[in-house]
Image (cartoon, helix red, strand yellow):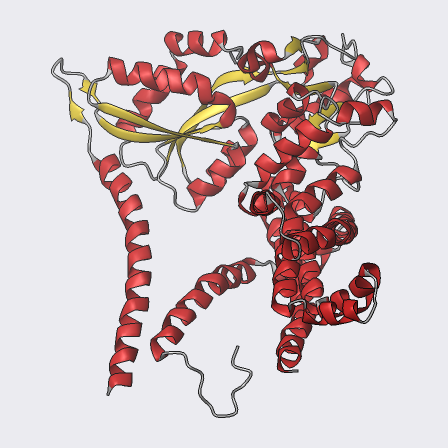
Amino acid sequence: MNRRSGTGYTGIPAWIYAIAAAGALFVLLPLVAMVAKVNWPEFIPLITSDPSLTALGLSLRTSAASTALCILLGVPLALVLARSPFPGQRLLRAFVLLPLVLPPVVGGIALLYTFGRQGLLGRSLELAGIQIAFSTAAVVLAQTFVALPFLVVSLEGALRTAGNKYEAVAATLGARPGTVLRRVTIPLVLPGLASGAVLSFARSLGEFGATLTFAGSLQGVTRTLPLEIYLQRETDADAAVALSLLLVAVAVAVVGLSYRRPGSAAPERAAQ
Amino acid sequence: MTVGRRHVAALLAAGALIVGVAACAAGSSGASASSTAESSAAGADGTAKPTGNITVFAAASLKATFTELAGDFEANNPGTKITLNFAGSSDLVTQITQGAPADVFASADTKNMAKLADAKLVDGTPRNFATNVLEIAVLPTNPASIHSFADLAKPGVKVVVCAPQVPCGAATDTVEKATGTTLAPVSEESSVTDVLGKVTSGEADAGLVYVTDVKTAGDRVKGIPFAESDKAVNTYPIATVGTSKNKDLAQAFIAAVTDSEGKKVLNDAGFGTP
């Protein structure tokens, strides 16, 4: 990030570039190898087949729903973690971040024992007539579980960087906490919230392990794009590679288009 | 000057990284290549007694039986070492065609063996050594009272099957067509393990898996055999991989799998004889 490059000084030793280049290659090379494997004459028919489009549609819909759920649950969590110190705060943060390091399959098993038919809440839910197992709702729950930390981390960082000066001033001018949150805090951290939401969406899009373990796999209901790729790989390697490229393209489009905005807005805000 | 030296150091560091990674990769494959290259030697009794190491790639459903068979084989043939690698048959074929060092391939269906043969990687003719049929797996309490294949189609029964793309799903399809029973599964999983998982966790009322899977699961599930399962008998072929560096030992192991001792181990686990 050398946005203040008026003088041309970047402050990065030259050798860093060489290792950075090796790092970039490490990420790019597998993608290049995949692109090279694509059966281009068949590419369009492969990605527009009925199962592929159904899986893509389901992936986009569930990821959008999970992102909304992440915002709903994650914003209050980030606010609590960033603003008011309380006993057990560090512990709470550690637990909220746990899905980041947990293998998704473990997340799926945990969700199964929570929302499954024999699970902690599942039995009461079933009595209430709500069945989560094998439904699209299960996919959304699995995706939210793994994506929530991304939103909380991004937003908590933004809240800490922004500080609470403006909020304090607003409060001394007589604004109620609700008004401060709505008129000062949220607008101030909007770029952080946006980038957190984008990351959550991208993570939801790629969710596989927890979905497979918890939600199952049925076309149009629970079989998202990653699960479709996993299944196609059994019989049709060309289809699996084509769909993988489609998933990469969607992820790059989502992250590339929306991630730039907060990046360029942040220094401007910091300079004010 | 200093900048130049830094550049050099940086390039060296980056180069070292790449060489290091390459060395790791070469190290692992090199080790197995040299071990499998150990040639067989003639035994003291005059008959060829193969020695050395081989790697056996076997379908995931063969895990228990092949672990036992390999142990027995090593005990009966001192100086041999069998390395086992278990995964889905199609994954194993992909691994072998991508150059994984396998000497023997045991597939859960003839289709994947044919795929390997198409890639000119099968030595000789594959031998069919076992069969497997489907069975209904339910919780020991059988909450949905399933007693026949037709029961799976009852409304409200949550049944989980394998997707048609994998062998157990193809078998399910065949049975459905042969019996004229159409199932409405709540999930089509990519592997038998996932189907069993959905049953043992109580998410599903019933799952369709192989007889041998029900046996392996022990008392966590109850197996319900059904007569229509003979409409889709899965045959397991085994063959020496064309690129094997120790074909004598590979043949000896295949002979051990297909002889009466091997049959007994397989039958005990629920496999049928072809």
Q: Residue at x 66, y 78 (%)?
A: A269
- Asked where in the image residue B68 lies, by quadrant, the reply is top left
State left or right for residue B274 relative to residue B261.
right
Above or below for B197 versus B102 = above
- Image spot of residue A193 (x, y percent): 70, 63
Above or below for B153 versus A49 = above
Compare residues A100 and A221 and report the one nearer the observer.
Answer: A100
- Image spot of residue B184 (x, y percent): 81, 27
Which residue of the protein is positioned furthest toward the left in this rendering? B44
Q: Residue at x 82, y 27 (%)?
A: A125
State left or right for residue A147 relative to residue B115.
right
Compare residues A120 and B10 and report the one nearer the observer.
Answer: A120
Which residue of the protein is positioned furthest toward the bottom in this rendering? A7
Above or below for A216 versus A260 = above
Compare residues A163 and A61 and report the one nearer the observer.
Answer: A163
Above or below for B121 versus A152 = above
Q: Residue at x 67, y 43 (%)?
A: A145
Res. A24 in view = yes
- Asked where in the image residue A264 lies, by quadrant, the reply is bottom right
Q: Residue at x 46, y 12 (%)?
A: B266
- Image spot of residue B213 (x, y percent): 57, 17
Q: Quadrant of the N terminus of chain B?
A: bottom left
State left or right for residue B34 relative to residue B140.
left
Total numbered labels: 0
- Image spot of residue A72 (x, y percent): 78, 51
Compare residues A216 and A203 and report the one nearer the observer.
Answer: A203
